[in-house]
């Protein structure tokens, strides 16, 4: 599934919603949450590997959006800003959880899932957080390189480097699992 | 697997998972709750010597200082603590005066001071780090008598099984501090200057929200082409310069 970047018909654009949220319009916030819940959840879930962590990260990210909407500038599209807030939060959560993850926790959380899901989450967990975020923005959200570069505040070349590194690591891990 | 096959395999495998039922409603409810709760203010009594902060206790905001320099340090401690408790700061710039601690306790506290913001370690980790593997219990006692809690982050030390262990000021405060650190970014970069700072660094404060990028470690910031700030000096796993803690 590719990301829907155009706004359809009468729906207000993300930028307009963010301006209304900054002005204290709670209804605009509810609309924005409805619009982004699936996309945010998908990235956070793949980024962090578990439902509870994903929910926590989406919560924190949207809380930050709610509080900081006035910091948004329309030099960028609204979605760029939103993805940046989300990936910032996910990377931060991951960092903080890393030492605890050395305990046997991730395996337990994934036990009931089908084998291929288990493999993909395990393989993803081996990537550095930044490279993983870039991989997910590319393959789940379908964002172009230039957009990913803006979201993560890096150059297009760094996006390509990180992406090929992530793919190389994923390929190695997935073929190990297959054999 | 060749590159095209990898692309296809990744697209299939990463097929976006759908949120569980009631997700948006739950998230909205929780956000409202968290927004309204805010951070209840905490006041501290601070005592300082010219060497650094010597004691910190939950209290009424009293300051005890033996010289003008000590007073300046104590005032700065109160400011930095207030920022920390509001989620605006991930590190302290204050020297700590541990001259009254015995040498074993000092080494325990120095080890605890090396635990990065937002991370946790076990009592055993401290014992091993100071070369007294069997002294796990004594480590707990030494941390329990930490004269400068928060500045020396003994709240980041948990039992090996992940349970909280103890805290001189109550487990409620310990879990509040851990939750606060969980919600606060540690390392923030600016995509215009390509510099990564610790959260709360004066240089980081000038970064507008839409230029902010969070990194999980100094290594990752460097891999993304950022250099570290020369003012707050972020490092991996060594949040204080050694001279910051001790008897200098």
Image: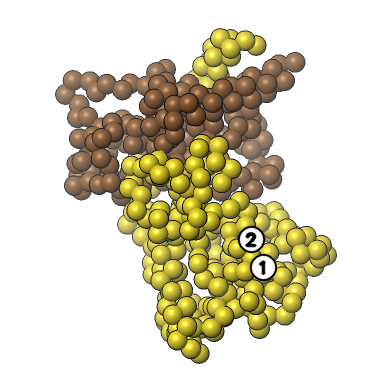
Q: How crowded is mark 1: few (under 14 residues within 10 Å), some or many (20 or more)?
A: many
User: What is the x, y in percent for residue B168?
Assistant: 59, 74
* A58 vs A125, nearest the viewer: A125
* A133 vs B177, nearest the viewer: A133
Residue at the spot 52% in from the left edge and 42% down from the top edge: B221
Residue bearing mark 2: B114
Residue A124 visible to the viewer? yes
Residue bearing mark 1: B110
Residue at the spot 40% in from the left edge and 40% down from the top edge: B191
Chain of the residue that carries numbered disc 2 in the rendered image? B
Colour of the chain lettered B: yellow
State how the image is colored. by chain
Q: Which chain shows up in brown?
A: A
Q: Quadrant of residue A142?
A: top left
Chain of the residue that carries numbered disc 1 in the rendered image? B
Q: How crowded is mark 2: few (under 14 residues within 10 Å), some or many (20 or more)?
A: some
Q: In which quarter of the image is the N terminus of chain B?
A: top right
**Position of A34 compared to B111: left or right?**
left
Residue at the spot 56% in from the left edge and 46% down from the top edge: B218
- Contact between marks 2 and 1 (CB within 8 A): the answer is yes
Q: Quadrant of the C terminus of chain B?
A: bottom right
* B171 vs B46, nearest the viewer: B46
């Amino acid at each position: 599934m590719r990301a829907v970047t155009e706004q359809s018909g009468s729906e207000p654009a993300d930028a307009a919603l963010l301006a209304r949220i900054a002005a204290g319009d709670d209804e605009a916030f509810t609309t924005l949450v409805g619009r982004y819940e699936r996309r945010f959840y998908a990235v956070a879930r793949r980024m962090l590997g578990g439902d509870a962590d994903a929910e926590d990260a989406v919560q924190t990210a949207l809380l930050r959006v709610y509080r900081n909407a006035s910091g948004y500038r329309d030099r960028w599209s609204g979605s760029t800003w939103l993805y940046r807030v989300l990936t910032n939060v996910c990377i931060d959560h991951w960092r903080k959880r890393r030492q605890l993850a050395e305990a046997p926790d991730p395996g337990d959380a994934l036990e009931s899932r089908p084998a291929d899901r288990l493999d993909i989450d395990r393989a993803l967990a081996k990537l550095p957080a930044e490279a993983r975020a870039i991989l997910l923005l590319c393959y789940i959200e379908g964002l172009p390189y230039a957009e990913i570069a803006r979201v993560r505040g890096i150059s297009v070349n760094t996006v390509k480097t990180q992406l090929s590194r992530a793919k190389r690591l994923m390929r190695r891990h997935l073929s190990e699992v297959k054999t | 697997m060749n590159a095209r096959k990898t692309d296809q395999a990744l697209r299939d495998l990463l097929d976006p998972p759908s949120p569980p039922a009631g997700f948006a409603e739950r998230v909205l409810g929780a956000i409202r709750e968290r927004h309204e709760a805010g951070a209840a203010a905490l006041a501290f009594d601070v005592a300082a010597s010219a060497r650094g902060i010597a004691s910190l206790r939950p209290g009424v905001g009293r300051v005890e200082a033996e010289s003008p320099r000590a007073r300046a340090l104590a005032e700065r401690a109160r400011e930095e603590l207030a920022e920390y408790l509001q989620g605006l700061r991930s590190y302290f710039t204050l020297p700590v005066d541990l001259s009254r601690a015995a040498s074993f306790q000092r080494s325990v506290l120095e080890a605890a001071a090396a635990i990065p913001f937002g991370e946790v370690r076990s009592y055993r980790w401290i014992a091993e780090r100071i070369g007294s593997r069997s002294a796990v219990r004594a480590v707990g006692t030494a941390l329990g008598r930490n004269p400068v809690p928060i500045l020396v982050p003994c709240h980041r030390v948990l039992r090996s099984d992940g349970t909280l262990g103890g805290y001189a000021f109550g487990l409620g405060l310990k879990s509040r501090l851990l939750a606060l650190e969980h919600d606060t970014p540690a390392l923030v970069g600016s995509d215009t200057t390509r510099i990564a700072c610790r959260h709360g660094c004066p240089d980081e404060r000038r970064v507008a929200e839409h230029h902010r990028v969070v990194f999980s470690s100094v290594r990752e910031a460097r891999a993304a082409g950022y250099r570290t700030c020369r003012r707050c000096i972020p490092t991996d796993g060594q949040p204080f310069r050694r001279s910051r803690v001790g008897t200098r």
